[in-house]
Amino acid sequence: MISQKTLYISSTTGFAMVAAAMAVPMFMGPLYEGTWFHYLYAAGAAVMVICAILSPYKGNDMKMKALRRIQGWSSLMFVAATFFLFWPGSTMRDWIAFTLAGAVLRGYSAIAISNRLRKQAEKR
């Protein structure tokens, strides 16, 4: 079985891969012809989804369970963005919109999970 720490590090690495792939068209410009960053983005999204599937929440706290589900949905947003990244008829704004939606969900859930864990630690 894979440890939770390994899954967390892998998920963070996947998110970093997505962020690095997002930076390429921003720095190189929208007319950049290279497509290697598409594969980096797809690999990062796949890593995040796999980590979300392999690390379900097994506790009794319903709010924590919902927050972990939100993190899973954010990973699916990155997969949807990957679809638009490879779809020939899509524009740059399509995959960027899904990426930003996934990043907002990931950011909210990360902050809310850390606050929830801190509150639970204070109760003990």
Image: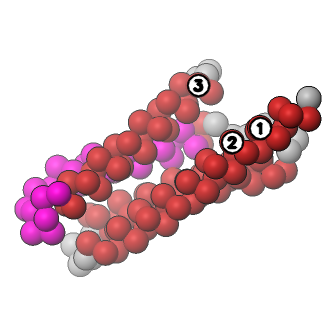
In the image shown, does 73 or 64 lie closer to the viewer? 64
In the image shown, does 14 or 47 lie closer to the viewer? 14
Secondary structure mostly taken by the magenta-highlighted segment of the chain: helix
Q: How far, Cα to Cα, is label 3 from label 2? A: 15 Å
Quadrant containing the N terminus is top right
In the image shown, does 45 or 107 lie closer to the viewer? 107
Task: Using the rendered view, name the quadrant where residue 7 is placed.
Answer: top right
Task: Give yes or no for residue 28 being in the magenta stretch.
Answer: yes
- Residue 64 screen position, x and y as percent: 77, 47
Disc ID at residue 5: 3
Mark 3 packing: few (<14 Cα in 10 Å), some, or many (20+)? few
Disc ID at residue 114: 2
Disc ID at residue 118: 1
Q: Residue furthest front?
A: 122
- Residue 59 screen position, x and y as percent: 83, 37
- Residue ID at (47%, 32%): 10
Q: Amino acid at mark 2?
A: Ser
The boundaries of the magenta stretch are: 27-52
**Given contact means CB atoms under 8 Å apart, are the residues at marks 3 and 2 in contact?**
no
- Residue ID at (64%, 36%): 55
**Given contact means CB atoms under 8 Å apart, are the residues at marks 2 and 1 in contact?**
yes
Q: Amino acid at mark 1?
A: Arg
Q: Is residue 96 above or below residue 112?
A: below
Quadrant containing the C terminus is top right
Residue 43 makes an appearance in the image: no
- Element type at mark 1: helix
* Colour mode of the rendering: secondary structure
Mark 2 packing: few (<14 Cα in 10 Å), some, or many (20+)? few
